[in-house]
Image (cartoon, rainbow, N blue to C red):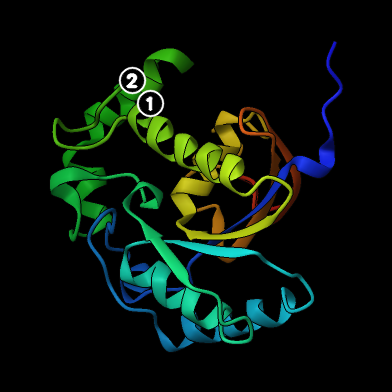
Amino acid sequence: MINKDVNNYCTLVLVRHGETEWNVRDIQQGWMDSPLTEDGILQAHELRGTLGDQNFDAIFSSDLLRAHRTAEILNIDRQLAIQTSKALRERSAGAYEGRPKSEYNTDLRLLIEKRGELSEEEWRKFKITDDAESEEEFVQRFILSLRELSVAYAGKRVLVVTHGGSIRTVLIHLGYAPRKKIPKGSFGNCGYVTLQCDGIDFFIQEVVGLKTVDGVKI
């Protein structure tokens, strides 16, 4: 058995962006965008203070405005070049992006109920609409991006500003908690997860800002 040097693992800190106008209005965002609210800007500044004693070798962000603006705030004291990537975007919700989540839940009620009866494997392949990403498609592009970063920044610390649904899905995929325990919306704005990765495997170090279905932090 080969003993891996943990000093060569990349440390990834995955951050959800601050609160947005559409978060407040309960509108589906996906690949569409809305600006940070005043509270969202304050959340980013508070997280900037929380992470103030952590050194980062690089900062990456989803190319969507809400994530990039959060990254800019977190970068104020660091002055690193923020590198954006489409691969770090939220999962696409197709035609329901930019529409109230109530419409999504009402229009697709029967499909949502059907999805709840699927096995884990079937769930990952399931598309709620033809133009949306399946969970499997999302995981493939997002996890691949994190692995590539881990190889490129072996032994380094990388800040990655992304989206709540993205981080929640990664936690489910890595076995941190079952999806029923951490439903949609359970990962708070400017919450973060610290991972270590050797380029293949991920090891969860810290989870901040996640609530379970009963509202209790884990």
Q: Which residue is mark 2?
A: 125
Q: Which residue is mark 1?
A: 136
Within 10 Å of disc 2 (Cα), the crowding (few <14, some 14-19, many 20+) is few
At which x and y percent is residue 76?
57, 86
User: Secondary structure beneath disc 1?
Assistant: helix
**135 over 209 or under it: above or below:** above
Image-based side of 169 in relation to 113, left or right: right
Label 2, label 1: how far apart the Cα atoms are: 6 Å
Instruction: Report the residue at 71% width, 82% height from top.
Output: 49
Give residue 108's quadrant in the image.
top left
113 or 74, which lies in front? 74
Within 10 Å of disc 1 (Cα), the crowding (few <14, some 14-19, many 20+) is some
Image-based side of 149 in relation to 12, left or right: left
Image-based side of 182 in relation to 8, left or right: left
Contact between labelled residues 1 and 2, with CB atoms less than 8 Å apart = yes
| Dot 2 amino acid type | Lys
**98 over 203 or under it: above or below:** below
At which x and y percent is residue 104?
22, 47
At which x and y percent is residue 106?
21, 44
Instruction: Report the residue at 55% width, 75% height from top.
Output: 80
